[in-house]
Image (tube, rainbow, N blue to C red):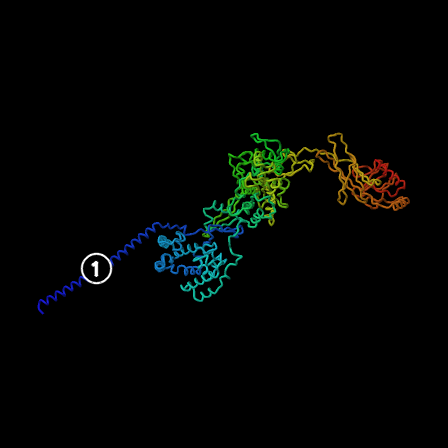
């Protein structure tokens, strides 16, 4: 091969090598460029993703801790610590992580987030799987949310399925994991989840479906609850027990797969009947009708709001109240039941009732109105402001008069034509005047004029101060003399009146009416004591004397229809009036009134009742309807007191009880001559009781020479007496009475100025006579005498007895008791010993004529002859037949007399 050829070959190979190198060089540049472009795209995507993520996160909500913990309903308990209702935006019982059993925790983790303790808010493996599924099946086709992410979504985000919401969810999940422990996150989650049947949180669900607390749940029950949040309606054990059981078994399988339970435990739990474990249908908690308690709960809500910084609807409080559930139910039925004993005339007439404990101010029951539905409606026991009428008189008139002026219950006032200080006339309800009387009488009869006089004596400022100390709001600029009888611009409620009256029954100590005793916060360790402080607002003598006068209202005054027999109760009625213009404007009769009140108390309970219509212009209370407040009061107090020992009001050492002569002014002690019906007993502040004895009544003499004779012919007892007087003005009348020894009263006929008769007396009976002289209101001491009517005997027996006596000169006589005695005869006559008024034998001195010496305890006829029989005379048995005819003659003479 020539050199040229060789050179050509070499050049050809060289060219091929160069070409090959150029080809390789071209191929390597394309790959690099492709990879570089792809890398650039990835970086651009990441940058864009990070930018977009940052953009989404920038608008994410703040990590607000208050939103992580949902509102928790509060429990309300009665005075006996029985749960009566729950109030809140959601029905939720909050539990801490330490209170959640491991069985429940494991069931939830196996179902919702098995790697909960391994990730930092986001489970990357589950997220990658979900991303693939979302690309292949569409966005949102599979979820990868951890427990932390679910907590974020339920607390801060909506259910919208978007990249923005997911980015914010991831970001906030990381933030939560950095701020809270796993246990805190689980606790917030498990209390937030909804389980159906108005149950929020796992503890509420356990109570709702199984009637158990969490620590009482078994494995199968815990698994049932863990499976519910995925679809509370589809797996509701009450409505779909088969579906719920299937879901439960899936949860048990997951628990076994993740190592929380053994296969044997799984199978045993799966074999259990879910239906058998559920709460019986009759015990299931539904939307409980709390209408019985709504009026009371209204006060509880307001009181918690006023006294604490906590929200009863969201803060999971335990509120312990003063409610008497039985009393509350009774009051509710009394106002609302179709068969109520009250018999309301129509459905529009309203009533407000408050029952509270007199000594503590604790409210036992509230009747907020009639025919009301739902909570937070208008409460006629607490929200109304109506004029109180005469129920204000103990508070602004007589109470202050005793407190500041030390008036007694006897203090005399004159009910007369009168006017306010500005000249405006004031009238009583009956438009009459009743003269001088005690303040006890004035209060019992509810007269207005004495009340105004007491108010004026006390002074406007003292009256206002006393009223405000009892819980009334009395604006100084709007407080006038008309308030003395209830004419107030700003009215009162039954709650306020009950509180004020209870202080009188509590020895002058005021306790503001309240419904809540204590509140336990959600942490279960902090307790707020909400009992109000007691205040001494009046002297004990004021409280007692007002109470005693108010007892007279119930027994002899305007409150008799409200009185409870056998119960020491004090109270006051009250009505208000329409003006003449209002009566004309509304077309109401003059007898119609807008308001009727009854307020009263015992040492145990205080009750205030108002009745009327929601608007004064809509209707009026008729005469019959005005009695309803008293009727309600009586029913409530009877029911409240039926199993309670109620003591009377205790008289304090600062009070003395004194006899007083009625009408004396100032009060004076009765004298020995004061008639008993002119003596009363009243209470005085110690040291102010009367010391002077009245001289109004002078002693008068008793009748003299009282004699009684039995007229056999007329068959009557004839009574005579003497009373010498020359003064026609002091000439007495006589009160004659007669009784038998057996105690029976006898009809006596006064036949003359100083004589009386008893017709047809019973043979053998002893009659006792009393004669009293009366001059005006003064009575003398009684002159008394007795007589025994002879026993009835046959005529033949009497003649034989007389024949026997003619032959026996020394026979004995028989006294009025039928006993034989020896006679002590004188030389001139054969006289027997007279017996005294008690039927006992006694000696008498006889004059020459044989006549008995007269006195009030002996009897003889005016002629001094043996005649009619007196108690101090005996039937002569040793006499002639002439004596018998003489006796008959004398009886005939007396008959014509």
Q: Position of residue 416 (x, y in %)?
A: 62, 32
Closer-to-camera residue (14/416): 14
Indicate left or right for 707 with 115 as reference. right
Indicate left or right for 874 with 342 as reference. right
Closer-to-camera residue (871/124): 124
Indicate left or right for 192 with 330 as reference. left
Instruction: Mark yes or no: residue 178 visible.
Output: no
**Secondary structure of residue under mark 1:** helix
Name the residue tied to disc 1: 29
The residue lying at 23 percent from left, 58 percent from top is 33
Closer-to-camera residue (753/590): 590
User: Badge 1: how crowded within 10 Å, few (<14), some, or many (20+)?
Assistant: few
- Asked where in the image residue 200 lies, by quadrant, the reply is bottom left
Q: Position of residue 270 (x, y in %)?
A: 46, 64
In the rendered view, tell whether residue 835 sits above or below residue 115.
Answer: above
Q: Position of residue 78 (x, y in %)?
A: 53, 50
């Amino acid at each position: 091969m020539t050199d040229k050829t060789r050179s050509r070959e070499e050049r050809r190979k060289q060219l091929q090598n160069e070409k090959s190198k150029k080809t390789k060089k071209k191929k390597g540049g394309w790959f690099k460029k492709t990879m570089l472009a792809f890398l650039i795209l990835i970086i651009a995507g990441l940058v864009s993703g990070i930018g977009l993520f940052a953009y989404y996160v920038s608008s994410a909500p703040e990590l607000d801790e208050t939103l992580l913990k949902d509102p928790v309903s509060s429990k309300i308990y009665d005075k006996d610590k029985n749960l009566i209702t729950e109030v809140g935006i959601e029905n939720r019982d909050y539990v801490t992580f330490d209170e959640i059993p491991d069985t429940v925790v494991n069931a939830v983790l196996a179902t919702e987030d098995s790697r909960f303790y391994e990730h930092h808010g986001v489970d990357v493996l589950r997220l990658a799987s979900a991303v693939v599924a979302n690309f292949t099946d569409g966005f949102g086709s599979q979820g990868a949310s951890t427990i932390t992410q679910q907590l974020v979504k339920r607390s801060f985000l909506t259910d919208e399925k978007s990249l923005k919401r997911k980015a914010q969810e991831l970001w906030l999940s990381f933030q939560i994991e950095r701020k809270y422990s796993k246990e805190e996150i689980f606790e917030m989650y498990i209390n937030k989840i909804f389980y159906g049947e108005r149950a929020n949180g796992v503890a509420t669900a356990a109570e709702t479906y199984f009637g158990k607390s969490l620590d009482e749940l078994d494995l199968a029950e815990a698994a049932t609850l863990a499976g519910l949040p995925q679809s509370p309606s589809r797996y509701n054990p009450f409505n779909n027990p088969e579906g719920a059981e299937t879901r439960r078994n899936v949860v048990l399988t997951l628990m076994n797969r993740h190592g929380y339970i053994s296969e044997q435990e799984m199978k045993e739990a799966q074999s259990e009947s879910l239906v058998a474990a559920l709460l019986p249908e009759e015990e299931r908690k539904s939307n409980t009708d709390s209408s019985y308690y709504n009026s009371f709960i209204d006060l509880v809500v307001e009181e918690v709001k006023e006294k604490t910084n906590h929200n009863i609807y969201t803060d999971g409080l335990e509120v312990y109240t003063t409610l008497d559930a039985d009393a509350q139910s009774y009051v509710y039925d009394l106002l609302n039941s179709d068969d109520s004993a009250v018999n309301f005339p129509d459905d529009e007439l309203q009533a407000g009732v408050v029952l509270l404990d007199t000594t503590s101010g604790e409210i036992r029951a509230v009747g907020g109105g009639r025919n009301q539905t739902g909570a937070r409606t208008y409460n006629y026991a607490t929200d109304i402001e109506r004029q109180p009428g005469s129920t204000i008189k103990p508070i602004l008139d007589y109470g202050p008069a005793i407190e500041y002026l030390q008036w007694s219950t006897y203090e005399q006032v004159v009910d007369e034509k009168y006017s306010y200080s500005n000249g405006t006339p004031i009238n009583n309800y009956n438009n009459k005047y009743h003269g001088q009387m005690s303040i006890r009488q004035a209060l019992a009869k509810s007269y207005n004029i004495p009340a105004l006089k007491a108010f004026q004596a006390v002074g406007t400022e003292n009256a206002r101060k006393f009223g405000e100390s009892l819980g009334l709001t009395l604006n100084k600029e709007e407080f006038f003399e008309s308030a003395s009888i209830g004419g107030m611009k700003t009215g009162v409620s039954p709650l306020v009146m009950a509180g004020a009256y209870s202080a009188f029954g509590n020895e002058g100590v005021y306790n503001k009416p309240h419904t809540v005793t204590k509140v336990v916060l959600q942490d279960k360790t902090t307790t707020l004591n909400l009992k109000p402080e007691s205040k001494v607002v009046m002297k004990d003598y004021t409280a007692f004397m007002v109470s005693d006068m108010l007892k007279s209202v119930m027994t002899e005054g305007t409150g008799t229809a409200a009185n409870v027999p056998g119960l020491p109760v004090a109270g006051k009625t009250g009505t208000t009036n329409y003006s003449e213009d209002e009566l004309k404007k509304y077309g109401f009769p003059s007898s119609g009134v807008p308001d009727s009140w009854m307020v009263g108390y015992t040492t145990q309970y205080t009750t205030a009742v108002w009745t009327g219509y929601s608007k004064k212009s809509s209707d009026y209370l008729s005469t019959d309807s005005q009695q309803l407040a008293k009727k309600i009061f009586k029913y409530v107090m009877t029911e409240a007191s039926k199993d309670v020992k109620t003591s009377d009001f205790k008289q304090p050492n600062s009070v003395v009880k004194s006899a007083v002569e009625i009408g004396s002014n100032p009060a004076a002690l009765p004298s020995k001559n004061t008639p008993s019906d002119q003596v009363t007993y009243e209470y005085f502040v110690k040291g102010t009781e009367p010391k002077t004895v009245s001289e109004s009544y002078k002693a008068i003499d008793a009748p003299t020479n009282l004699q009684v004779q039995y007229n056999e012919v007329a068959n009557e007892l004839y009574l005579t007496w003497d009373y010498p007087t020359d003064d026609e003005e002091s000439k007495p009348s006589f009160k004659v009475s007669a009784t038998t020894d057996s105690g029976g009263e006898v009809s006596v006929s006064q036949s003359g100025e100083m004589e009386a008769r008893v017709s047809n007396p019973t043979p053998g009976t002893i009659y006792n006579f009393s004669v009293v002289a009366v001059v005006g209101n003064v009575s003398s001491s009684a002159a008394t005498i007795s007589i025994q009517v002879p026993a009835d005997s046959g005529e033949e027996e009497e003649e034989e007895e007389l024949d026997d006596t003619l032959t026996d000169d020394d026979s004995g006589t028989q006294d009025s008791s039928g006993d034989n005695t020896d006679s002590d005869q004188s030389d001139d006559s054969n006289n027997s010993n007279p017996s005294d008024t008690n039927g006992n034998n006694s000696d008498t001195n006889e004059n020459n004529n044989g006549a008995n010496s007269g006195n009030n305890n002996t009897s003889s006829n005016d002629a001094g002859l043996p005649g009619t029989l007196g108690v101090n005379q005996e039937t002569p048995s040793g006499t002639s037949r002439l004596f018998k005819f003489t006796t008959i003659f004398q009886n005939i003479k007396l008959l014509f007399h």
